[in-house]
Amino acid sequence: MTANIGPGPSDRTETETIAAPVLARRRRDFASRGYIRLLAGLLTVLTMVTIAAVAAALFRDSFTRFVPVTVLSPRAGLAMDPDAKVQLRGVQVGKVASIESRADGTAALHLAIDPEQARFIPANVGVDIASSTVFGAKFVQLLTPAEPSAQTLRAGQVLRGEHVTVEVNTVFQQLTSLLGEIEPTKLNETLGALAKGLNGRGNKLGQALSDFDGFLAKLEPNLPALRRDLQLTPVVANAYADAAPDLTRILENSTRLSATIVDQQHNLDAFLLSALGLADIGQEVIGGNRQSLTDLLAILVPTTDLLHRYQGALNCGLGGLVTLGHNPPLPLPGVLVSNGLTLGVEHYRYPSNLPKVAAKGGPQCTGLPTVPYETQVPYVVTDNGTNPAVYGNEGILLNSDGLKQALFGPIDGPPRNTAQINQPG
């Protein structure tokens, strides 16, 4: 290995061969660093764009799930725009996603309701398109009904808009249409006549307005009743309309009755005179016997009270007689009696068998007035007369007081009959 210090061809060749790799290595480092910087710049730009897009999406609630609801309204209003607020009791519960104009001139507002708020909104909620002022932007106002339903607002539900706030341009349009129909000459004449009529009458006009204000103040408490009367007026009018033929017939008959009274006025005068005479006679009869009639009515009070208490039994008895009267007649005229022989029973004794006076048992119908076929009427057990089963033996009895007293102890007097004269019984 030789090394030439001096300048020469061999020295330049060696220098070039040694410097070439170093220069190539430096160029590769610069190229790689340039790619890294470019890639870092692109990543930075993409990151900033992504952050901006996510922020815009978050601002527009693109990642939030909403409950879609459609509102059909006669019109949407001039200042109704997408993203308008949907409020319930002053609280925002959603927004207007889009507005669709329909072929029939109505508007369909597609609402996006917050799911967290939708579960508090009843399904029968009302809808108004309102605004804070005449010139203000519109928003959808949800109205809670008087009787909220148990079901809540659901996705895809269609609501009906009830009222849309009038815009100022609508007022101007109607005013312009009205002014277009009015002739200026006639309007000038009307205003002139009105000014002439009111000239010098300011005090009277002010007093009239003051009186009218007082009248309205007195009328205001009765407005609910007046409103209710107006609501019932169609029902009453329909009822009168249905009864109009009958009312007309009554009026026609009244006319005929009036004509009859006019034709029979002499007979009517005679009838009235006779009625006056009868009243005079009745006054004498009733006036002379007033005390007797009063006493008679006082005496009848216990009887009428008793009849009133037993009216049920009397009705049943009379009903049974009516049923009996409809039975088929007997085969032969007369009375049909069914007789038979029974075993002997205890005789009537005094005083245990005396009937009770003014006994109280209450009204009893015992199946009347209609007794079903083959029905045995229940036997009413009372203690106001003779009881044939007082000794518990309804068979043949020996008419011996000694045997009875031996068996049952002391008893009342002997059997009552015509042969035992001057006996206790």
Image: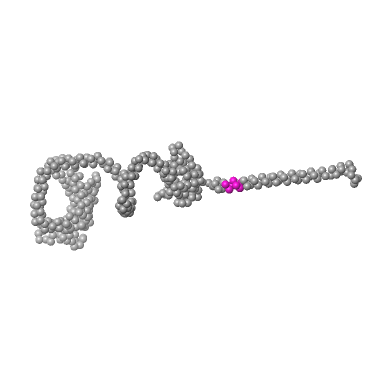
* Residue closer to the observer: 230 or 399: 230
User: Which residues fall within the magenta stretch?
Assistant: 50-56
At x 21%, y 41%, the residue is: 251
* Residue closer to the observer: 294 or 269: 269
Task: Classify residue 208 as left or right of residue 258.
Answer: right
Question: For residue 52: magenta?
Answer: yes
Task: Classify residue 333 as left or right of residue 10.
Answer: left
Report the predominant secondary structure element of the magenta stretch: helix
Across and down, in percent, residue 262 comes to 13, 42
Across and down, in percent, residue 154 comes to 47, 45
Question: For residue 230: magenta?
Answer: no
Across and down, in percent, residue 99 comes to 48, 42
Residue 118 visible, this angle: no
| Total count of labels | 0
Residue 251 visible, this angle: yes
* Residue closer to the observer: 49 or 364: 49
Q: Quadrant of the N terminus?
A: top right
Q: How is the image coloured?
A: one colour
Across and down, in percent, residue 147 comes to 40, 49
Task: Classify residue 295 as left or right of residue 154.
Answer: left
At x 49%, y 46%, the residue is: 84
Q: Quadrant of the C terminus?
A: bottom left
At x 90%, y 45%, the residue is: 6
* Residue closer to the observer: 212 or 59: 212
At x 15%, y 44%, the residue is: 336
